[in-house]
Amino acid sequence: MGSSTQTAGSEARKAFEAVGAALAVLDAEGTVVGWSQAAQRLVGHSAAEVVGQSAAILLAAEEDRAKAAAVADRSGPGGRCSRTARVLHRDGREIDVGLCAESLAGPDGRAQWVVSATDPALPPSGTAEDTVATKSPPAPSGASQHPPIGVDIQDTRLRCIWVNGVRGAQAEMLEGVMRQLLDNGGLLIDPDQQALLQEDACQDATSTAPVFRLDDVLGRALGVCTVNPGTTDARRARERRALLDEAGKRIGTSLDVMRTGQELADLAVSFLADYATVDLADPVLLGEDPLTRPGPGKRRDALFRRAGLASIHPGAPESLFARGEPVLVPPTSPYTTALSGGSHLYPVVDSSSKTWLDQDPLRARRMSETGMHSLMIVPIHAHGSVLGMAAFMRSQDPRPFEEDDLLLAEELVGRAALSLDNARQYARERSAALALQRHLLPHRATGAPAADVAWRYLPADSHHGVGGDWFDVIPLSGARTALVVGDVLGHGINAAATMGQLRTAVRTLADMDLPPEDLLAHLDEQVVRLAEKDVEPGDPAAATIGATCLYAVYDPATGQCTMARAGHPPPAIIDRHGQVTFPELPIGPPLGLGLGPFESVTLDLPGNSVLALYTDGLIESRDQDIDAGMDRLAAALAHPGLDLEDLCSSVVDALPAQAPIDDATLLLARTRSLGPSRTVSWEFAADPAVVGHARALTTRQLARWQLEHLADSTELIVSELITNAVRHGSGPVRLRLIRHRFLTCEVYDTSCSSPRLRHPRATDVNGRGLFLVAQLSRKWGTRHTPDGKLIWAEQQLTPRCIDH
């Protein structure tokens, strides 16, 4: 073999390796002058081992060699042969391949050959007989109709003597380069030259068109060969870009790790595999830190859960585990080793004995039953931590996975990993915010004796995270109950923490027995202080905290409810007949703006009325305005026969099907009335002589309530409180006794000054009144009214007295 022939073979080899096709070029004598890298992967022989050798030595059977020789003798230029043949692999085994040989004319009229081979996993399904033609009839079923890449051959006069595709319009542009190759030999691989490409691939900047000279065995130029990757490589590049573009649209559409895992599986089955699974580590699903990526040689037992599952077959019969179920992974499985060792590619799954499938018989049996023959396993990791693993299999598609498929799968998984990690971090923050919010919200709130209560809290299922909704039911003096619902602007941990601070502030202010409008004014100041905390003066960030709130106080002794709101939706009132109204309340500015004052309104609420407080998440939706939401709420509340829990469920069931765009909170309170049997009141002149009369009235009332055992202590409390009222006030004095969970004694006077508890010394003549009241009662306090104040004291009742 001359050096020219070796040079031609070397140049051809470089060209074919550049495009990665399983292709060989034979001269007129059947000698291999071109050998691609893909051909080496197919049969194991390197180019150095076969170039310059007869192609017949690669055929295992004498019958195949004889038929090849007969075809060569019978065919002329333009002929084509497609058949199945058995080829000798370098390791000694014999493999079946589909061969397609197309002839071209040399300068002496003898046929040269371009031979392509299909993968061993694609055996021809048609006849094994040769087909020789002078034109281009259809090839038998299962055989390639043309080489997997485009090849354009021109003779020494640059006349096209053979082409297996559509010639590109830029062929003439390479004429000067081709003449240089004919004179001097060599190889041109120019990624900027888009010559001889099919028309739809001409704009593909990733394609190349290697050009090299074809020589005979004596080193004489036979012509110029252009290898056009447009028919395969450019198409694959376009498909790859299209798939990655599709991944950008379809993976990571939400911040839900389970949904993201399913999106990856769905996309893979649509474009890459027949069956795909995505298994995530349990901590990832919980929003916790993922597994630390083990080092080489180390293994970590991990719990996985199936987050994504897709198959071309309905019901995914390939899967051993349903979506959401834990996944068992034997320690010897490549699924485990992939966590530390990286991706695994199994072009052909070996289910014979002494493989990893021996330790996983259930998986082995399922793979055999469903015909899964090729497998890729890709770990899902982000920032050095393992989130899970993705597996891709083929069963119906006979082609095995290749390195290009693995690279594509790794890129898809890499993109999905970013979305999964974002979703994991969101889940972690959302879980923390939910845990904090649920810890701060009441767990066993009761409005007794003023009202029965029920509530619902629905966190938003959106990328914004948990909001700052809160509610509370606060017992007040005199059997009254405060009902509050609020909403901190914003979402996440900060909103939940701010909510907790405001709820604590409301409870503190409520213990001071402030009227609703005064309570909101103080709460507004608190929000302003929170916004200014740790912020430099003049910094615009000082006004970033805001909230809305509705605060209502119901008195079961009078059947009246006093309420005020700060930028919050109005309450709904449902009477005993099911009529729903939204009372007109002064709206007031949101909290945190410092724009008060606030105004309150007092309404009559007869017993068995229902008061509904809620946040705007209950009436807002993406496709409806607030009025439509309030109409929907009114219709859901108009069921007087339901108990409060069922009424809450009715409201929740009426919500739109899509997830709420914001947290939604509902607080229902069915009012009770104490009535005259549990309350009694008297009015006295501001005269010290009335003290004895007030004590006598109190003693008789306690006898009617069968509370004689409290007579002595109550007489002392009444005596001290009325004495103080007469001494410091100028108008009438009123006394009211309320029997509920406690015995409450209230004394009203026209003075606005607040009494102060002192600890008198033994020599003091005065100052023991409030000290005695504090000693005789479980709790006492002062409540201001529009025209004065009242002092109240509570005494504990026994369970028998409460039930009486």
Image (tube, rainbow, N blue to C red):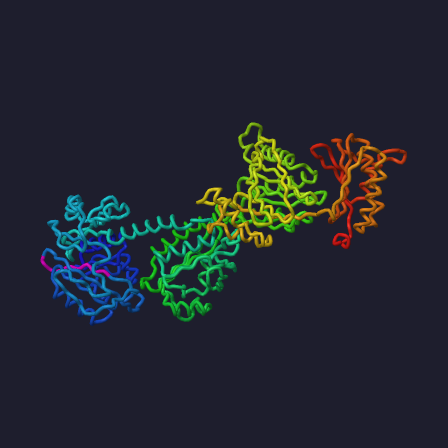
Most foreground residue, 468 or 402: 468
Q: Nearer the viewer, residue 306 or 177?
A: 306
Q: Is residue 505 above or below residue 16?
A: above
Magenta region: which residues? 108-116
Q: Is residue 347 left or right of residue 112?
A: right
Total labels drawn = 0
Q: Is residue 265 above or below residue 727?
A: below
Image position, residue 426 (x, y; %): 50, 47
Q: Position of residue 132 (x, y in %)?
A: 15, 65
Question: Is residue 176 shown above or below 410?
Answer: above
Main secondary structure of the magenta stretch: strand
Left or right, residue 451 beside residue 403: right
Rendered residue at 21%/69% (across/down): 127
Expressed as whole percent of the image width and height from the top left, the position of residue 270 reads 35, 57
Q: Residue at x 39, y 56 (%)?
A: 266
Q: Can you see residue 425?
A: no
Which quarter of the image is occupied by the N terminus? bottom left
> Quick check: 525 left or right of 120?
right
Residue 761 inside the magenta-drawn segment: no
Instruction: Give the farthest residue toward the left.
Output: 108
* 719 sits to left or right of 532: right
Front-lying residue, 212 or 794: 794
Coordinates of residue 134 in the picture (x, y in percent): 12, 62
Who's the residue at 80% across and 46% down the image?
A: 701
| Quadrant of the frame with the C terminus | bottom right
Q: Say which quarter of the image contains residue 315.
A: bottom left
Membership of 114 in magenta stretch: yes
